[in-house]
Amino acid sequence: MENIRKTEKVSVIGLGQMGLKLAALLTESNKEVTVWNRNLSKAASLKGVTAASTPGEAILASEVAVVCVYDNAALWEILKQIGDGSALKGKTLINFTTGSPAENDDLEGWMTAKGAAYLNGAIQSAPDQMGLPGTTILFAGDERAYNNCLNILKIFGGNSKYLGARAALSSAMDLATLSWLYGSFVGLIYGSAICESSGLDLKLYHDLIAETTPGITEFLKHEINVIRQKDFQVSQSPLAISVSATQRILDAVRVFGLDSRFSGNIALLLKEAQEQGLGNSEVASLIGVIRPRQDTDLQDRA
């Protein structure tokens, strides 16, 4: 079994809200922390840290550098400041900057060429929720580096998920979870507007959402498994039912004078699926409309 070493020195590059939280969690766990930020005055609220004058100095100070800046374009600008990149040789860089899978492919290739181990982390929580047993963070990239850094990764959150050796996988999963989040959130806002338009107390909506969410979550998990197994025979809910339901929502939204773009697009997607012959399939067969090409399994197994 490979010997896993503990990392005691950690540098944090970027002191926005999340970066400050990460640095504070490390110092509270008795790590030796070096920080760098364009505006070093942001480090004033941190106790027990060393402020580096350049990002290169911060990287040289520790075996592991944690980066959390505005975007990956900002990260590339920082990397330009460390010259030929030789300071990265033998180091591990953990990037918590939000970016696309393609951006992380580029970063991983560049870091590997410089002799650095690269991990991409996708944080699934707000700063105030960091450092808790249930805090979920997605990681992908150099597996050896991941194992060697577990002692610091657990400081940031107790529910770390390692997704694979390609660093872009964590940003892809981040996009997947955000897609679900924003779709659900916009639906929640539309539901609030429908309640208001109907004269319903939003407290009733609030309570009903809380009460029904656990059961809905089980249904959503079932639908994901339907897609995984590629068996779209009706097992919970035929797609045709959702076609009529989403049309009723669209009709009500129009009657209430609400913006109909969101509801209209959902109704259109379901209608297209029905027109493709998927009406008597499980509702998860909607993925056949989303994919860039026809999935013959939908037709073969429906």
Image: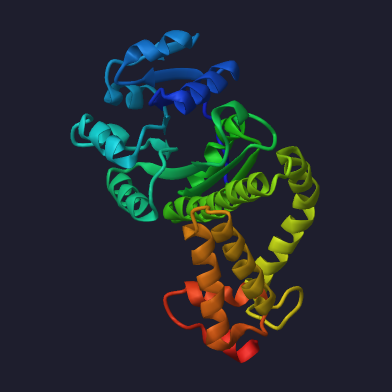
* Residue 121 vertical placement versus 256 (above, below): above
Q: Residue 221 in the image: x percent, y percent? A: 70, 62
Q: Residue 131 in the image: x percent, y percent? A: 62, 29
Q: Please identify the quadrant where the C terminus is shown.
A: bottom right
Residue that appears at 62% across and 74% down: 243
Q: Residue furthest bottom?
A: 300
Residue that appears at 55% across and 69% down: 267
In the image: residue 157, left or right of residue 114? right
- The answer to whether one can see residue 1 in this image is no
Residue that appears at 38% across and 26% down: 14
In the image: residue 265, left or right of residue 91? right
The foreground one among 54 and 249 is 249
Label total for image: 0
Q: Residue 104 in the image: x percent, y percent? A: 36, 50
- The answer to whether one can see residue 26 in this image is yes
In the image: residue 251, left or right of residue 120? right
Q: Quadrant of residue 135?
A: top right
Q: Residue furthest left?
A: 83
* Residue 187 vertical placement versus 232 (above, below): above
Q: Quadrant of residue 105?
A: bottom left
The foreground one among 108 and 44 is 44
Q: Residue 212 in the image: x percent, y percent? A: 78, 52
